[in-house]
Amino acid sequence: MDDSRFHAEESLEKCLADAYESMSPDEEARRRMLAELLAASERRAPKRRSARRALIPLAACLVLAAGIGALTYASSLTQPPSSGGAATIASINDELKSAAPSSADEAQSESGAAPSDGDARHPFVTLSSGERLRVALGDDGPLPASPEIVGEELERTVATGPGVTASSPCTVFATSDPAHPYAIRYDENGVTYLADPA
């Protein structure tokens, strides 16, 4: 009986080995499995952008960068150069002395004007009609205009200094003061001063 049992176990092992060998895929099944694996790996892989699809956003970024650069350059041209220190105060005082009337007392009061005042650097305005205006001066420097006497806006223009090397944007108004018929408001600091025909 042991012998028959041994043959039965041997034939069972052979049957199992044959069954296991027959479970391997045939050639057609191998091709299908390979195709399915390749398709699945392509679906999971990141898609590559074509050059045409990337060209439009790239061009938009370049146009935006060029526009920002042009605006920055243009704004740097319109702003007066900033300077500070004792040399600037001295040059402003020199400009005021050269633009002042011949009276020594008036020249001293003009040189005492604050260097940050727009009128100190740019006391002259030329209207579109060709009429030239000058900031009115008192004992303590430029005469400020009170809001009650400032009337309608005449025009927007540019104020210049005696050397006409630099300018400052301003607005000219009519006033109700017969002694000083005009007022000039400097855009950079918003201060308004009385003005007379030059």
Image (cartoon, grey):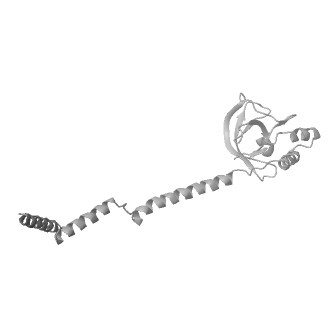
View extreme (front): residue? 1
Q: Is residue 166 above or below residue 138?
A: below
Q: From this view, report whether residue 65 is shown above or below residue 20.
A: above
Picture quadrant of residue 151: top right
Residue 67 percent across, percent down from the top left: 56, 56
Residue occupying image coordinates x 71% and y 29%: 147
Which residue is drawn at the image coordinates 65% and 52% (left, top)?
A: 75
Q: Name the quadrant containing residue 45.
A: bottom left
Residue 38 at x, y = what percent?
28, 65
Residue 198 appears in the rendering: no
Residue 160 is situated, as x and y percent measured from the top left of the image, at 76, 48
Going by the picture, which residue comes out furthest to the right?
A: 104
Is residue 111 visible in the rendered structure shown here? Answer: yes
Seen from the viewer's position, the closer of residues 148 and 18 is: 18
Q: Is residue 28 left or right of residue 195?
A: left
Horizontal and vertical percent for residue 117? 78, 40
Q: Looking at this view, is 181 or 68 the one in front?
A: 68
46 lies left or right of 108: left
Residue drawn at x 57%, y 54% is: 68
Q: Where, quadrant-wise, is the N terminus in this rendering?
A: bottom left
